[in-house]
Image: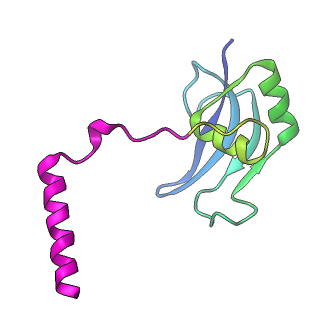
Amino acid sequence: MALKIRLARGGAKKRPFYSIVIADARSPRDGRFVEKIGTYNPMLPREHEQRIVLNAERAKHWLSVGAQPTERVVHFLANAGLVEKPAVRETPKKSAPKAKAQERLKAAAAAAASAEG
């Protein structure tokens, strides 16, 4: 059985509240789970202590058993010091503005600089 540490959504419409759960990878997002190890309330400010509540002991146990955390849960576990922080991926060059757009940006910056001084 492939286990995942993931978020299960609860709460009302436009008022999300998530449970951090251990679930079989094949079960639906809000479906059956093995154990609830914490909660995440994105409506609270970042510095609030109740924004992310996590049972670190149980998270360590499930990681040692082989449960794979999702991308968002990896950030929570990294902030708790249970796993290493994921590497920050760079934006691909393909999405950078093309030559004409860069020329327009330079022209706009030059116009703004000449208007100021």
Question: Residue sitting at 60 percent across and 32 percent down?
Answer: 70
The one nearer the camera, 81 or 46, is 81
Quadrant in the picture for residue 56: top right
Left or right of residue 44: residue 64: right
Question: Residue sitting at 69 percent across and 58 percent down?
Answer: 51
Q: Position of residue 77 (x, y in %)?
A: 72, 41
Q: Is 102 contained in the magenta span? A: yes
Left or right of residue 16: residue 80: right
Q: Is 78 contained in the magenta span? A: no
Question: Residue sitting at 67 percent across and 44 percent down?
Answer: 19
Farthest residue, direction top: 1
Q: Quadrant of the C terminus?
A: bottom left
Q: Position of residue 102 (x, y in %)?
A: 19, 54
Q: Position of residue 27 (x, y in %)?
A: 58, 22
The one nearer the camera, 41 or 63, is 63
Q: Position of residue 24 (x, y in %)?
A: 65, 20
Q: State the scheme by which the image is colored.
A: rainbow
Quadrant in the picture for residue 94: top left
Quadrant in the picture for residue 90: top left
The one nearer the camera, 54 or 114, is 114
Q: Main secondary structure of the magenta part?
A: helix
Specify start and end residues of the magenta stretch as a single range. 88-117
Q: Image height check: is 34 above or below 98? A: above
Farthest residue, direction bottom: 117
